[in-house]
Amino acid sequence: MIRKVADVLSLFSPERPEWGVSEVARVLELPKSTASELMASMADERLLSSAGRGRYRLGWRLFELGQTLLDSTEFRSEARRVMQELVQRWGETAHLAVLEGVEAVYLDKIQPSPAVKILLSRVGVRLPAYCSGVGKVLLAYKPWDEVAALLQGRGMSALTPNTLSDLEKLADELRLVRERGYAYDLEEATIGLCCVAAPIRDYSGKVVAAMSLSVPAYRFHPRREELTAAIVEAAGRVSDASGRNSYEIEGFSIYGRKELQGA
């Protein structure tokens, strides 16, 4: 039953915010009576909201649960404060993301005003991790065998001509990310947009999230070294506030910048 509820919820998207009982039954290969009873029960629990005539939208209880999740995520409040400082200083967009499977899930996004609109990365959206800076950081610290198996099953579609859509090339890229402690997206998700991302660690040193600065390509390349130093230092401060003592990655320390390696 829980799996069926999850399957129904997974159908809803910004492009398709409303579903009818007959449509859900057909797509999920359920008897119409089962789909009707299930969706009515979900509406009773406010997981869905009736739109009339056997049609439903997502319910507000999901928003409440999502807000509870965000509010109870230990590093998020500190990450938001640091992201606001980054945006104020650099005038670029900052993102915070976690990994689910091989997808980066965006938990927060702060933009300057005015800002270049970045349509792909609204809060709550999922994107393939292999083509974003935050995603590559998160994948880099997962067991490669696990990552490779998931990507082989899902495929690696290219979002732009620059997307790394080959497993061997991605493995090399993730190895480099681990060595230097940060990742780049060089117009791999969106043409004209680059980003640099760094890991956020919990008290044990485990990578639990990633933070990035997204910058139009024409502004990114002249300032790449400075932006890299800024995001690594910022992610380090969030990690430190989460209970981890000072840590150092190649080229940077949270207590000050060292010589940049391979930027």
Image (cartoon, rainbow, N blue to C red):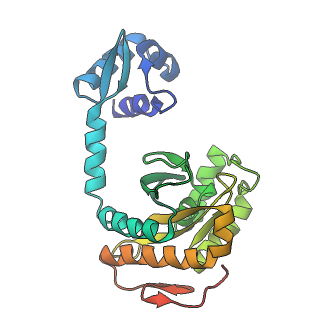
**Residue 62 in the image: x percent, y percent?**
30, 37
In the displayed structure, 85 sits above or below 28; it is below
Closer to us: 89 or 198 = 89
Which corner quadrant holds the C terminus? bottom right
Give the residue furthest to the right: 161
Closer to us: 89 or 190 = 89
The residue at the point 42 percent across, 89 percent down is: 255
Q: Quadrant of residue 133?
A: bottom right
Q: Is residue 181 left or right of residue 61?
A: right
**Residue 184 in the image: x percent, y percent?**
62, 67
The residue at the point 42 percent across, 77 percent down is: 236
Q: Quadrant of residue 75?
A: bottom left
Give the residue furthest to the left: 44
**Residue 253 in the image: x percent, y percent?**
47, 86
**Residue 125 in the image: x percent, y percent?**
48, 45
The residue at the point 41 percent across, 28 percent down is: 8
Q: Quadrant of residue 194?
A: bottom right
Give the residue furthest to the front: 114
In the displayed structure, 60 sits above or below 205; it is above
Report if residue 38 is visible in the image.
no
